[in-house]
Amino acid sequence: MSLRKSASVLVLAGTLGTVTASPAFATNDSRSTVVVQRSGPVKTIPFDLRDAGEALIRFTVSAPGVSWVRPGAESAVVSVGVDGRHVTDLVVPSAEPTARSLALGSVKRGRHKLTLSFSPQSSSPGARKVVLNRTEIRTPKADQAALRHAPVVVGRTLALLGDAHQNARTDTPLIGWHEELPASTPGHRIFEYSVVWSNEDGGTDSPALMARWGRTTDIEWVYRVEVDAKGNRVDGTGVYQAANHETLVFSGTYEGDHPLLQTCTVNNNMCDAVTTPAPLRFFLDTTQTRPQDRAREILMDRNAWTYPVMAQEMIREGRIESPSDPATVAVGDQRNYLFIEIKKQTGAPTGTGAAPGVTVGVRLKADPATLYRSDHAVPTSSIARDLPAATTVELPEGTTAADIASVEAIRQPMGTGDNGAPATVTSINRAFFLDRAYRPQSSAITWTGSVELTPAQPTGALWHD
């Protein structure tokens, strides 16, 4: 295969076989397998990198006997190094083969050594080994500027949660991405980096997460920085999301241009002073981006394996109502929810009082008189933000998309009084259930139009069968 300009070609020697680059990640021979075992030797794999730059590693990984839902067997952890330097850790929460991608930082042209070692201190007692297949390392040309400034997130070590390796069993970072924002200086850009955690042990409660955000993962922006036309950091522009969701100037340590941040609150906000040595490091691949007209949860949709992890953490931590009852506010079996994303816009107020949110309602063919609401009739759990927004509607067990008669929008003031502002819903971007394995099924409902909700006309049909 000839060299393509979009990515460096590399060769992974020894047990990994030969990999050649292409515009996307290539895969090697499926027989090329690396097994990293508890009490086993460190696996060292030489590789050649033809182009220097910010490197990524991608593979399919599984941990036989591991399940995020089972206490004592939540995950296996592999420490990943390059040329003797600890770069990142990989938390593997499943026995199912899963495609994962991590950052390796700046790597020079030439020959290097990748090391993979089982971490007994971080891994659950029930974890014995990790199996990696179809491994590739590359330096993607198109994403170098964004990769260059991506943060390294050090694992949480809060004493109240027990140990320094807690992100191997709770609130683990799953995926990252970046967004490019406009800068006031011509030729400059602003990169904002975000992370999806499996849950949050504090902050917004689970019923409100499902109603207001459409998931029980935690999604937070982590770091934001302005770069010049050459991709260099503009001094003083690096900021991070600190405790209580404050935006503070980053004054911590950089590895190259990568800021070191640490998850330091129960709701996954950051500190720029980090624990050393770091018990866990998360250096996520942040090349993924979000379409401007879609909610952040689309990153989870595109990485479907994040949904089972989300659901399993809720079950293991005893946060799921059993039996599930859509008439209660408590979170039930997440397979009973319609995961839906809408787009809305709030108009100008005409008076004083609370601003309106929007609630999604669902009626079923077998019982059209009952309206199942995303907010469970809790006004503060309606959708307030004027962005594409995800929510969920809990329905009776066994409900399928074919059972849905209609989807409605309800204008819901979020406090005392009503400021009179209209709210206009213009789309349903997707609506799906989770399958038996908690993975998203195909979207069953989409809609575009314009439904204006006012104090005089607070409800409107968005879609009906």
Image (tube, rainbow, N blue to C red):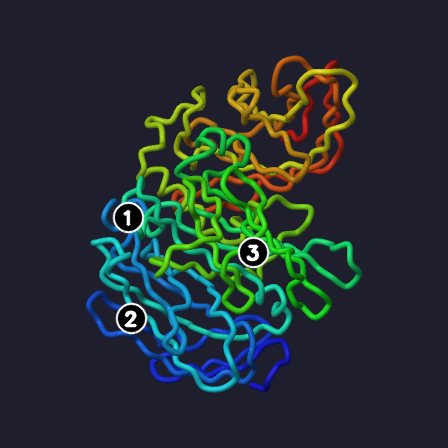
User: Which of the marked residues, 3 or 1, is nearer the chain's N terminus?
Assistant: 1
166 and 441: which is toward the camera: 166
Q: Which residue is mark 3?
A: 177
User: Which of the marked residues, 2 or 1, is nearer the chain's N terminus?
Assistant: 2
x 66%, y 21%: residue: 411
User: Which of the marked residues, 2 or 3, is nearer the chain's N terminus?
Assistant: 2
Return the x and y of residue 320 as percentages of the image width and height: 36, 32
Which picture quadrant has residue 114? Answer: bottom left
Query: CB of mark 2 within 8 Å of CB of mark 1?
Result: no
442 and 244: which is toward the camera: 244
Amino acid type, label 2:
Val
Which picture quadrant has residue 381? Answer: top right
Amino acid type, label 3:
Trp
The quadrant of the rendering that contains the N terminus is: bottom right
Query: CB of mark 3 within 8 Å of CB of mark 1?
Result: no
The number of numbered badges drawn on the structure is 3
Q: Which residue is mark 1?
A: 163
Name the mark nearer the viewer: 3 or 1: 1
Would you call the spot at circle 2 few (<14 residues within 10 Å), some (14-19), or many (20 or more)? some
Question: In this rendering, does residue 388 appear at all?
Answer: yes
252 and 91: which is toward the camera: 252
Return the x and y of residue 351 as percentages of the image width and height: 76, 16
Instruction: Tell me the number on the disc at residue 35.
Output: 2
x 45%, y 53%: residue: 273
The quadrant of the rendering that contains the C terminus is: top right
Spatial CA distance of label 2 from label 3 is 28 Å
Left/right placement of residue 123 relative to residue 394 reads left
User: Helix, strand or loop at disc 3?
Assistant: strand
Return the x and y of residue 308 as percentages of the image width and height: 40, 46
Amino acid type, label 1:
Asp
User: Helix, strand or loop at disc 2?
Assistant: strand
